[in-house]
């Protein structure tokens, strides 16, 4: 199965999305279609043996929408061409390749300029096709990336501005002429209004009327049809009044043009607002450099980033963004990795150190061997995850979908019934009934329902990505609110994940002497506790000595000779076996063990010097996070493979509600399942790879990422930065995003429930209020813009626990 996302322009409401989904779902070989009209994205999973992407794109275009085909232009060199028939053969072969948009072959220069969609094919496939045809692919002469989506978006907004200027200018002129005709006394005014309105509606409303016609032909009526009916009815009545078929009371030229002006204004403002909903993705994409310098045949060559291959050496100068994920092979520098790790201080990178694409090189020149390029880099994985999450559909979207599915037929019915009631039953003038019909057609706004979920989802998930919180599924929003228990894996999540020396007690010896002998004895050992002792000595600025003799005793300790003195480092049993009494430290060691710390004794020449308390240090932010979860009304649990004594000590220190200790890694998922059977809704926080089964079993899995391979992470939420407070950010942001969706749906429901009856004349018998079509168009424009603007407020979200963002 092939999974692609394409950008589509011209979708204005949920009906448009439904039309595309229905058309593509009926195609043989298409397995899944997910349309997010708020971002203009259509995601398709299909069997490429049964249907091609070009055919799928044509199907979308046949519905009247514009597929924004990402274009990349490459000039390839071809050997073996000798005549015009060779040119035709190559053009035909490349033109038939899936994803190739244009081909132009030049025999004189033995090259072909190929415009292709990089999401479908690439230069390697183009080269293979040339070779299969019987000619030789000799490489790339040049390649240029074009940001077609940005250009298409700017072109669309420019066209909208021109149409708005024309529609509003003519609309205000026709309005002034219509309502000032008694004072102006212009001869032939209806014909002047006809001359002004006709070209304006033809120019500014052409796309809308075309879309309405196509929706009729494809039996998928949308809002364009309703708007076209409203404007078309007002214009047609005006023409008939101009010809004398109807009375002059039916001159609605100013109404028809102003209706169009309001509709265009609403769509323009909505397009501008919707563009801002995807700012987070644009910011992430901006981290990818366009071009870079690689070493080829000993020379530095500047190439497009898409041309870099795995294994090539990339030269990164000071201030440049690192273009690929790789390993430093030469040079030294400090790299700003805050976009991945959240660490504000640049990190020193030298030979053998890994670097991540999109991070910023500091002061030195480094050469990097590319290990992951293109879509395989960490940054590309983040962008892909965010895009997929933004097009997902949380359960609350089903309500909006059901409403939209029945909305347009219901509105058409209300419009016709209001006309029938006022004209045939209430006996009001035909013009009044006609006005209510137009107002109902124009004021109805399913777009507000359609935009309610996707705009909030896009902004909320995008804001999360900016903060290093990747929400992978829309369903997370609703489940997070219902969660009753947050279960933390201990090692590496609540704790740092490696043992450290937290305390030193002595029998009167100098602490520096104790650390010198202990670290010198342990320096050859690979045991984690030994490494902790050595690190503690290094932090104290103590230079160790190489032991003359060294022997490790499994499970007990080490014996070494340092500067001619016999040093023993190990547990109580090891000391007693070697005739060293540990009684002098009995009280201090007891206090260590009560706090779940391991005592490592140190003796020199048979005399006890002291003991080191070693433990996996609790993270500084752990207590703050647990307290915040309690304030949210959630209970907190701890699960670990450690002894119950260690787990209870940590739980007591952090005020954790309950403990699951001595649990084997493979049994963690079963423990989660037991909680679920007891009626709990469980959030599990753990390592994205090691805790994969438990993360998958939990109602919501939050993976604390290593920041190197996001695609491998299990879990519904991935925390990119080494900050446990992001657990609170994930839960809080999910809750706020869901709240915005509910506000949007409520507003859409309130607007339509209140104003459709008003437009149908509900207030006329009570207060004598009749809704003018122009007012209806203004209200409709306001409703969609209000929903998008409300969603955009999520961009201001700041994490609850002391972080800037």
Image (cartoon, helix red, strand yellow):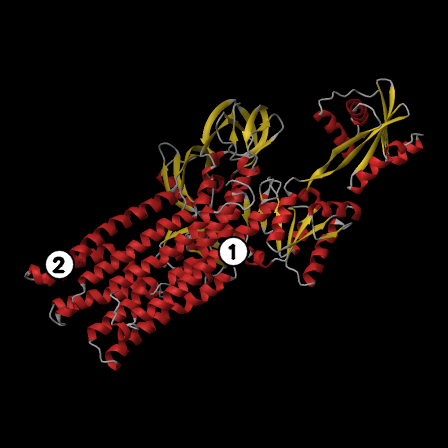
Question: Going by the image, does 316 lie left or right of 618?
Answer: left
* Residue 559 point in image, percent of width and height: 87, 27
Would you name the residue on which mark 2 appears?
A: 177
Residue 525, quarter of the rendered image: top right
What label does residue 206 carry, if any?
none
Name the residue at 35% across, 49% down.
Answer: 272
Q: Which label's residue is closer to the chain start, 1 or 2?
A: 1
- State whether residue 178 is above or below residue 351: below
- State whether residue 192 is above or below residue 147: below
> Which residue reaches farthest top?
563
Distance between the alpha carbons at the discs numbered 1 and 2: 60 Å
SS label for mark 1: loop
Q: Tell which of 118 and 521 is nearer to you.
A: 521
SS label for mark 2: helix
Q: Which part of the image, by quadrant, shows the N terminus?
A: bottom right
- State whether residue 181 is above or below residue 321: below
Q: Tell which of 759 and 385 is nearer to you.
A: 759
* Residue 347 point in image, percent of width and height: 58, 29
Mark 2: few/some/many CA within 10 Å (<14, 14-19, 20+) = many
Please say whether residue 349 is visible from this viewpoint: yes
Q: Tell which of 401 and 489 is nearer to you.
A: 489
* Residue 644 point in image, percent of width and height: 79, 48
Asked if labels 2 and 1 touch by Cβ distance under 8 angstroms, the answer is no
What label does residue 47 carry, if any?
1
Name the residue at 45% across, 67% down.
Answer: 402
């Amino acid at each position: 199965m092939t999974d692609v996302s394409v950008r589509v322009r011209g979708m204005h409401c949920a009906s448009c999305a439904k039309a595309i989904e229905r058309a593509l779902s009926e195609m043989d070989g298409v397995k899944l279609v997910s349309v997010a009209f708020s971002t203009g994205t259509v995601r398709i999973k299909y069997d490429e043996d049964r249907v091609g992407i070009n055919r799928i794109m044509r199907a979308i275009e046949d519905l009247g929408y514009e597929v924004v085909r990402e274009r990349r232009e490459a000039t390839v060199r071809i050997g073996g061409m000798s005549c015009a028939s060779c040119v035709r053969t190559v053009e035909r072969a490349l033109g038939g390749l899936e994803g190739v948009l244009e081909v132009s072959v030049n025999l004189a220069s033995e090259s072909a300029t190929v415009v292709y969609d990089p999401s479908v094919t690439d230069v390697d496939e183009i080269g293979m096709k040339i070779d299969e045809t019987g000619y030789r692919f000799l490489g790339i002469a040049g390649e240029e990336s074009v940001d077609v989506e940005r250009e298409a978006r700017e072109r669309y907004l420019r066209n909208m501005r021109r149409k708005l200027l024309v529609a509003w200018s003519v609309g205000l002129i026709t309005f002034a002429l219509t309502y000032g005709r008694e004072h102006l006394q212009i001869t032939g005014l209806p014909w002047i209004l006809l001359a002004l309105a006709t070209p304006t509606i033809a120019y500014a409303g052409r796309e809308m009327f075309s879309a309405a016609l196509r929706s009729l032909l494809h039996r998928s009526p949308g809002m364009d049809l309703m708007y076209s009916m409203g404007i078309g009815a007002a214009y047609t009545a005006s023409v008939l009044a101009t010809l004398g078929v109807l009375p002059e009371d039916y001159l609605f030229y100013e109404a028809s043009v102003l209706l169009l002006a309001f509709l265009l204004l609403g769509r323009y403002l909505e397009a501008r607002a919707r563009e801002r909903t995807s700012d987070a993705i644009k910011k992430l994409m901006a981290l990818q450099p366009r071009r870079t310098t690689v070493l080829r045949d000993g020379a530095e060559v500047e190439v497009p980033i898409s041309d870099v291959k795995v294994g090539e050496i990339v030269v990164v100068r000071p201030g440049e963004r690192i273009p690929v994920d790789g390993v430093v092979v030469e040079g030294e520098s400090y790299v700003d990795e805050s976009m991945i790790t959240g660490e504000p201080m640049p990190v020193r990178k030298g030979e053998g150190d890994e670097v991540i694409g999109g991070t910023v090189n500091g002061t030195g020149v480094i050469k990097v061997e590319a290990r992951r390029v293109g879509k395989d880099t960490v940054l590309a994985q983040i962008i892909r995850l965010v895009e997929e999450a933004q097009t997902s559909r949380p359960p609350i979207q089903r309500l909006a979908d059901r409403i939209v599915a029945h909305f347009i037929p219901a509105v058409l019915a209300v419009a016709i019934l209001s006309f029938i009631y006022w004209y045939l039953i209430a006996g009001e003038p035909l013009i009044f009934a006609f006005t209510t019909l137009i107002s109902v057609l124009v004021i109805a706004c399913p777009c507000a329902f359609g935009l309610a979920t996707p705009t909030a989802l896009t902004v909320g998930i995008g804001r999360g990505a900016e903060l290093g919180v990747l929400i992978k599924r829309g369903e997370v929003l609703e489940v997070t609110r219902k969660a009753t228990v947050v279960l933390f894996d201990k090692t590496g999540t609540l704790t740092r994940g490696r043992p450290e020396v937290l305390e030193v007690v002595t029998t009167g010896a100098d602490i520096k002497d104790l650390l010198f002998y202990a670290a010198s004895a342990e320096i050859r050992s690979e045991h984690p506790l030994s490494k902790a002792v050595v690190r503690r000595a290094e932090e104290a600025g103590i230079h160790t000595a190489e032991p003359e003799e060294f022997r490790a005793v499994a499970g007990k300790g080490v014996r070494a000779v340092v500067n001619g003195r016999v040093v023993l480092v190990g547990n109580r049993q090891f000391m007693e076996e070697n005739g060293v009494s540990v009684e002098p430290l009995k009280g201090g060691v007891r206090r260590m063990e009560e706090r779940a710390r391991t005592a490592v004794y140190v003796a020199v020449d048979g005399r006890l010097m002291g003991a080191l308390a070693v433990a996996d240090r609790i993270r500084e932010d752990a207590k703050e996070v647990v307290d915040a979860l309690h304030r949210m009304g959630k209970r907190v649990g701890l699960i670990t493979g450690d002894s119950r004594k260690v787990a209870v000590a940590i739980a007591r220190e952090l005020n954790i509600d309950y403990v699951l200790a001595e649990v084997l890694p493979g049994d963690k998922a079963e423990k989660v399942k037991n909680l679920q059977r007891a009626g709990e809704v469980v959030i599990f926080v753990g390592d994205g790879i090691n805790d994969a089964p438990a993360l998958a079993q939990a109602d919501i899995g939050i993976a604390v990422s290593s920041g190197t391979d996001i695609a491998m992470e299990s879990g519904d939420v991935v925390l990119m930065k080494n900050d446990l407070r992001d657990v609170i950010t994930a839960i809080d942001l999910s809750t706020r995003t869901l709240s915005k969706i509910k506000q949007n749906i409520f507003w859409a429901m309130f607007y339509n429930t209140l104003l459709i009856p008003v437009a149908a004349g509900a207030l006329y018998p009570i207060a004598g209020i009749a809704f003018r079509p122009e007012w209806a168009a203004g209200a409709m424009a306001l409703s969609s813009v209000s929903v998008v603007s409300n969603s955009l407020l999520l961009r201001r979200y700041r994490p609850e626990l002391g972080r800037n963002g």
